[in-house]
């Protein structure tokens, strides 16, 4: 499933089925940010964005059709990041007007009220959230010194926000790492990618591995997917003229290193989702504003 804000300011959606894209469908209403989509149940996908009034809006795919986008409410001062909490529940998180986090949960067929999580010193980037596979969600964002902040939602409440250090050039990316209760944070810093792993357990700085340099010479945020187990597929763009897409895959033990996956030039960052138990489907926009996709591991 792919959802974008198109040139008309509307949410456009497309599905990849039987080795082909079904075609773009433009949904009603204007949005003012990128969208974030997550699965909740079998063949069910929920996508959310903020509208022109900064309220959270969403649409739901039930396996056959999309619902008319509807307003959840609140004031989101960034695009939301949505992640699955459980088989029946998800959460969408964005920056709040006061620099903390605004969030709402969707369970069964109803949204909670939008609530705010205060963060000392405030946040200065959109959050990136990922399920931890154990009934919780880990979100990463940046503070004013470009250090990475980590917050964890347990399914019912937020644990304390931790400064896991690092200095990032872009908003972080968070992805499930295959360990129940764990997550992986990636950032771009000094033209390289850096990773920091949380393997579950006590929610404290000491439970994070510390940032490790993945190398490379990259120009955009790293975007990742967790097809299954400990396998993680990440993509980004290189710094050379034309900015070609590159991938780097963790097989549960080691990383492959950065490998160019397309000769097509790209004009913005990539996006990835799990395709099967081994591969990820990753997309990027070419110079003609058309979407290109690659499947690989």
Image: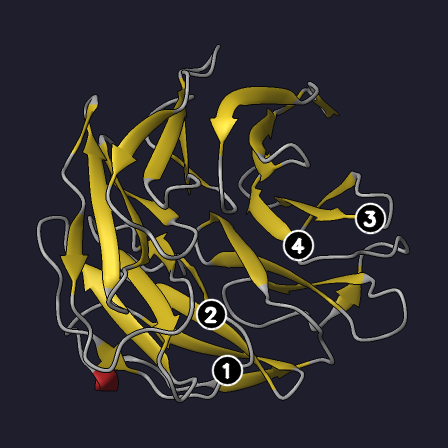
Residue shown at the point (68%, 20%) measured from the top left: 18
The quadrant the N terminus occupies is top right
Among numbered discs 3 and 2, the one appearing first in the sequence = 2
**Distance CA(mark 3)–CA(mark 2):** 23 Å
- Marks 1/2 in contact by CB < 8 Å: the verdict is yes
Other-residue count near label 4 (Cα within 10 Å), few / some / many at <14 / 14–19 / ≥20: many
Where in the figure is residue 115, as x and y percent of width and height? 15, 50
Q: Which mark is residue 168?
A: 1
The vertical placement of 105 against 168, above or below, is: above
In front: label 4 or label 3: 3
- Marks 3/1 in contact by CB < 8 Å: the verdict is no
The residue that label 3 is drawn on is 286
The residue that label 4 is drawn on is 270
Looking at the image, residue 63 sits to the left or right of residue 249; the answer is left
The residue that label 2 is drawn on is 172
Among numbered discs 4 and 3, the one appearing first in the sequence = 4
User: Dot 3 lies on which element?
Assistant: loop
Residue shown at the point (21%, 43%) measured from the top left: 104
């Amino acid at each position: 499933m792919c959802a974008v804000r198109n040139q008309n300011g509307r949410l456009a959606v497309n599905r990849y089925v039987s080795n082909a894209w079904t075609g773009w469908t433009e949904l009603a209403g204007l949005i003012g940010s990128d969208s974030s989509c997550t699965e909740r149940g079998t063949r069910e996908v929920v996508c959310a964005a903020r509208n022109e009034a900064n309220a959270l809006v969403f649409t739901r795919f039930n396996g056959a059709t999309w619902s008319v986008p509807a307003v959840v409410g609140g004031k989101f001062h960034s695009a939301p990041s949505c992640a699955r909490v459980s088989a029946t529940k998800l959460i969408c998180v964005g920056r709040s007007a006061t620099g903390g986090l605004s969030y709402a949960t969707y369970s069964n067929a109803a949204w909670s009220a939008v609530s705010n999580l205060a963060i000392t010193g405030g946040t200065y980037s959109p959050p990136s959230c990922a399920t931890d596979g154990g009934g919780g969600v880990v979100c990463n964002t940046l503070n004013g010194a470009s250090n990475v902040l980590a917050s964890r939602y347990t399914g019912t409440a937020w644990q304390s926000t931790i400064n896991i250090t690092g200095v990032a050039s872009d908003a972080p990316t968070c992805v499930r790492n295959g360990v129940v209760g764990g997550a992986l944070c990636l950032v771009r810093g000094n033209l390289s990618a850096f990773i920091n792993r949380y393997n579950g357990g006590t929610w404290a700085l000491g439970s994070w591995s510390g940032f490790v340099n993945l190398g490379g010479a990259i120009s955009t945020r790293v975007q990742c997917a967790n097809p299954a187990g400990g396998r993680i597929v990440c993509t980004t763009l290189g710094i050379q003229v034309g900015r070609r897409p590159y991938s780097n895959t963790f097989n549960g033990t080691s990383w492959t290193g950065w490998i160019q996956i397309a000769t097509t030039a790209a004009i913005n960052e990539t996006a990835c989702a799990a395709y099967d138990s081994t591969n990820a489907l990753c997309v990027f926009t070419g110079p003609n504003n058309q979407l290109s996709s690659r499947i690989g591991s």
